Image (cartoon, rainbow, N blue to C red):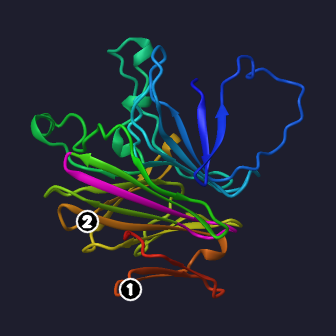
Amino acid sequence: MRPRLFFISGREVGYLSAQPGVEAPVDLVGHSPTAGTCLLYSDSGLPNQQGPLAPDKIVFRDGWREDDRYLLLNLRFTGWHRYKATNALSLFYKGEPLVREITTGDFFDWLPVGRSLFRDKRIPRENLNGFLIPRTGLVSVLQILTGIGSRWAQDPPYYAAVEDFQTGGEFDYVHTRLADWHGWQHDRRVYFYHDGGPIVVVDDASGSSQQAALTWHLAGEGKMEGDRLSLRDGDSPVEAYFVPLDAKGYFETTSNPGENSGVSVVYLPVAKGRLHLVTVFLPEQWVGADVKWNQEVGTLRVENKDGASVVLPFPGAE
């Protein structure tokens, strides 16, 4: 494991290195960290070749208790395992996963044992929570003729650029960009409101004259009712609310059994060459909140039944 460099609010904090033997029990008293949301850089090289530090992940965190909210945004597709999750959201957790990836599948029996597992670079891009573009060229023709493989391109750019990263008392914010992916640019903005507030993900993409898509793999078996989907009921409910900002497209939902239990949602815009979608995660007292996009002034307002509200500062615009 290479050392990872931690940044908080743009300030370099220091390195965390792997220590041999730490996997064994030790007679020490643990203390919860004080760092919350942070941007992580790590080595961009290989096990036998050290490289410069590069953006790795962004961790959003409310705290360090078991049921505190945690959101992980991946920034790279390179290094040891070539995980196809550039600019994809790997996990949203509150007591249990609410957004996750489909990371189980069939073995590849024709490969050697060490390479036959369904993991790392073998996990298709559409099994992750991110932006999709169609295959192009010869690989697209072969997929259409044979029906083998995915219709979606699999190898995104190596890194997503961090355009802006801020932490604050009301919310933490990041703007990341995946650029020059076969002519496409994908901007993802995350607003992580504290004190049990909503979490808002704004996806804005433009590119070639093809139809792109956006995928979410969500907990729960709830059905879409309009633009709203229940992720969890009970004492700690959570729901997702979708706000298309382009010419409204359509959603495809699929129930996933077994280890991948939950609902997969694919958003497909009507317009080609354009995708603009806001996904709002509404926890507990925010469930059922009224979500309104004011196109004239370019703001999104989320107001719950108790009258509490947040207004996003121009989502999708600089």
- Badges 1 and 2: C-beta atoms under 8 Å apart? no
Q: Position of residue 43 (x, y in %)?
A: 50, 29
Which label was assigned to residue 40?
none
**Which quadrant holds the C terminus?**
bottom left
Query: Which residue: 21% across, 44% down?
Result: 151
Q: Which residue is mark 1?
A: 297
Q: Position of residue 8 (x, y in %)?
A: 62, 50
The secondary structure type at the circle numbered 1 is loop
91 versus 47 height, above or below: below
- Outermost residue, top direction? 112
Q: Which residues are magenta?
A: 182-199
Name the one closer to the observer, 312 or 259.
312
Of mark 1 and mark 2, the one earlier in the sequence is: 2
Q: Position of residue 250 (x, y in %)?
A: 29, 67
Q: Amino acid at mark 1?
A: Val
**Which quadrant holds the N terminus?**
top right
Q: Which residue is mark 2?
A: 269
112 sits left or right of 71 in the view: left
47 sits left or right of 194 in the view: left
Q: Amino acid at mark 2?
A: Pro
25 sits left or right of 207 in the view: right
Query: Which residue: 20% across, 34% down?
Result: 148
| Magenta-span inclusion, residue 280 | no
| Magenta-span inclusion, residue 188 | yes
